[in-house]
Image: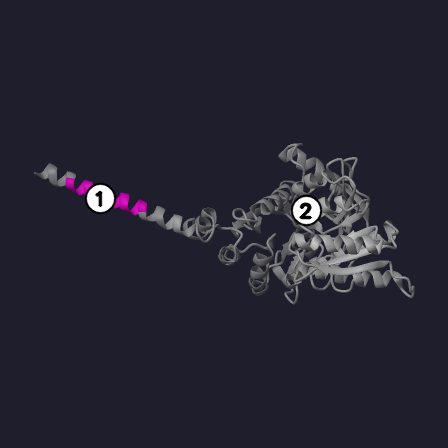
Amino acid sequence: MRLERLLSVKTGRRTKLISLIMLMAMCTLAMTGCTTFDNFRYTFIDEPQKNDGNTIYIGVFEPQTGSDAEIGAAEIKGIELANSIYNNVNGYNVELIKVDTQSNTKSAKTAIENLIKMEPVAIIGSCGEASSLIASEFVGVARIPTITPSAVNPLVTQDNGFYFRACITDAQMGAGIAEYAYKHLASNNIAIVDIKNDSTVTAVVDGFDDKLKDMLGKKKTNPVVLRTNTTITNDSWKPLIKEIQKSGADTVFLPLTTDQMDSFLTLAEKKGLRGLTIIGTKAWGTADFVNMTKKHQAYKFAFPYDTVINEDNITTDSVTAETQRFIIEYATKYGSDDMPTQNAALGYDSYLLLMNAINYAKSTKGPAIRDALLKLTGVHGATGVFEFDEMGNTIRHVNIATIKDGKIVSDYVTKDTSHAGSIGAIE
């Protein structure tokens, strides 16, 4: 009887232990709906890390799952590459802490709150516009300097004080397009097609107009021979083609998606509208768009793009030895078949900018790093030479890419730098 009671007690304890393990597993799975298991474990399971004073942390606030995961993965690869090269600053070892926005606003809010609890000295991210807007308030209150590699929404950095961006804004894209069309192509027959109810395209067009006015000065001859807007339907292509033909334009700003452009060009070719230079936005820098253009050889395509390679697979005129190092190190780490995207290069540059600021500040305090970022000038990254305006927007030359032999290559780098606020040359 004593043996039976003992076995009964042991069996009961084992049952309770199994139940406890299952409960912990269920809690863990439930938490992954808000953030990644690694983040949950770091925040709620692991003992708080006791910093020996020799390590600082950079937060990585990017989507690792969901609709933006591919872009997030590219930026993370650039960040991790930079960290593998530059992992020490002012005597501190630098480690990365990654959180997953899961490409949605609810998870992004949880992720940024958990990341701030981990007390990074700075944060990189996000590629998502909505996630970056959500993070903006939190990093401002926490006074943690943050750099988004690719979010272009002006509200991300506006009136924040601690949010910066490595990419150019929509207005800066427009300025670069204007210089490319008017100065590089020397076109006096430019058509501008705006898209109805698309604020992003409108911002690009506004940047184009501001830059064109600056370049024209007192000249009365306007190179824009057509200015129109359209809706995105197949029924709108025929009248738009007629407008462009009638205008005599040889250069057209037409920011359509890959499928829309394919449909438009198929009809344009039938109607005899050929030989144009068609300019779009950085959204064209994808493999799908490049593949689409192979069907439409009668056109030249150009678009703003933070590419780092020209047609000879070497660096562009706007960048330095850091670009070459990025290309070589990227191939070494990820393989020669894995060509770096502009998002990877911008992730790399975001990390470099923080390392430069921490080194310049001689401090790991957020306000000191922020102040150092604002004072940086002539910082050479993989995508160009950096400095920031007072709002945290980069002051940059704009690279215009084209497509040649199935590759995205650099076609022109603007002579003037552009400012996110007032477009034009920086005096």
Question: How far across and how far down the image is residue 269, in percent?
Answer: 76, 44
Q: Which residue carries the number 2 mark? A: 263
- Identify the element where label 2 is drawn: helix
Q: Which mark is residue 75?
A: none
Foreground pick, 354 / 205? 205
**Image check: 130 left or right of 187?**
left
From this viewpoint, which residue is outermost toward the left? 1
Question: How far across and how far down the image is residue 92, in percent?
Answer: 61, 48
**Image check: 12 left or right of 226?**
left
- Identify the element where label 1 is drawn: helix
Q: Residues within 10 Å of mark 2 (few under 14, many from 20)?
A: some
Which residue is drawn at the image coordinates 77% and 41% (left, top)?
321
The residue segment tinted magenta is 8-22
Q: Which residue carries the number 1 mark? A: 13
Residue 157: tell me if it is visible: yes
Please state which of the two labelled residues, at mark 1 or mark 2, is closer to the viewer: 2
As displayed, is residue 409 above or below residue 51? above
Amino acid type of disc 1? Arg
User: Principal SS element in the magenta part?
Assistant: helix
Question: How far across and how far down the image is residue 177, in percent?
Answer: 79, 54
Question: Label 1 to label 2, Cα distance in Å?
Answer: 69 Å
